[in-house]
Amino acid sequence: MGNEDEGSLLGVESDEDGCELSDAELQEAFAKGLLKPGLNVAVEEEKKTANNVDGLKLCLADFRKDLPWVERLDLTNPPAVDVVAKAEGKQAVAAGEEVNAEDDFQREMFFYRQAQATVLDALPKLQKLNIRTKRPEDYFAEMAKTDQHMQKVRQKLIQKQQIMEKSEKAKKLREQRKYGKKVQVEVLQNRQKQKKALMSAVKKYQKGMTDKLDFLDGDQEKPKNSTAAPKTRMSKKGPNAKRKFKDQKFGFGGKKSGSKWNTKESHNDVSGFRARIAHGKGKNATGKGKRGNKRPGKDARRKMKGRK
C-alpha cells in the first residue's frame, strides 16, 4: 500500500481500482527508497464502545409502563396437565422438570401444553371484561392481500398445473410409443417365424419328405377369438331351419339300413291315416273311382307330335 504520490511515481493505479503491483515494480520501488516501513501494514482502529446510561434508563422506563392487562395480554403460567400421557399410562414432564431440548416431540408437546394452559387462563378473564372471543357469523374482514395479487397467484397455480398435465401427457405418450414399438417388434418376429416355418415345410415337400399340404391352409385359419363368438351364438340360438331339415332327412350319420322298416309302434300308429284320401273320396283323390292327370303313352305322344 502507499499514498497517491508514491503510486503516481511508480506509474501504476491505486489499489482501489483493483490492480496490484508486480514483484519487479515493488523491487524497483524498494531500491529507489519509495517504500518505507509500515506503509504496507493495515492498521485496525479500535472500536469505540458507548455506555449511554440515560438512553438505557429511558428504555427501561418505557418497559415499566403500567398498562392494563387488556392492552398487554401477557400471561406466564406452567404447562397444562398432559391428559393423553395419563390415558396411555406414560409419564409426562412435570412443570418443574427440565425439558430435553434434543427431543423434538417432547419440546413441541411442552409448547402445546403451555399454550393450552394460557388459553384456559385467558378465556375467563376476557369474558369478565366483556370481550368477545368468538367471531360473529356476519363478520367481514378485509383480506390482507388485494384481489389483483390473488389473481396473479391463481394464474401462476393454473400455469403450474397445466405444465404438470402437459408433462404427464408427454410421459404417457412416450410410454405408449415404447409399448407400440415393442408390439411392432413382436409382430415382425412372429411373421419372420411363420415365414421360416413355411419355407422349411415347402422344402420338405419338395424333397419328398412329406406329402401333406396342410401348411398352405395356415393363412386361411382364423384366430381363436374370431371363431369363439359364433360358436357361443350357435349354442345359444340352436341350429337354423336348413340344418334341422337336413338332420331330419339324412340323420346324424351312423346306421342307415333298415331306418324305414316298420316296427310294432309304427304299425299300430294310425294317426296319419286319412279315409277320404285312401278311398278316393277327397278333392285330390286318385283312387279307382277317379282318374288323375296321367301322362299319355308313347304312341299317343308320337301322334300328338305328328299333328303339329
Image: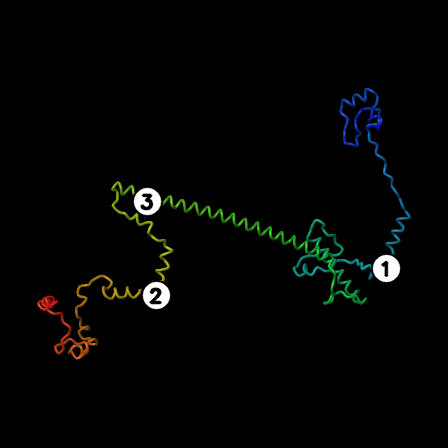
| Real-space Cα separation, disc 1 to disc 3, in angstroms | 104 Å
Disc with the residue nearer the chain's start (1 vs 3): 1
Quadrant occupied by the N terminus: top right
> How many callouts does the rendering have?
3
Tell me which amino acid carries mark 1: Leu
Q: Residue at x 25, y 45 (%)?
A: 211
List the single residue furthest toward the front: 308
The disc at residue 198 is: 3
Quadrant occupied by the C terminus: bottom left
Give the residue number, with chain letter if any, for mark 2: 237
Q: Nearer the viewer, mark 1 or mark 3?
A: 3
Where residue 8 appears, as percent x and y from the top left, is 82, 26
Q: Secondary structure at mark 2?
A: helix
Disc with the residue nearer the chain's start (3 vs 2): 3
Tell me which amino acid carries mark 3: Leu
Q: Is residue 162 left or right of residue 222?
A: right
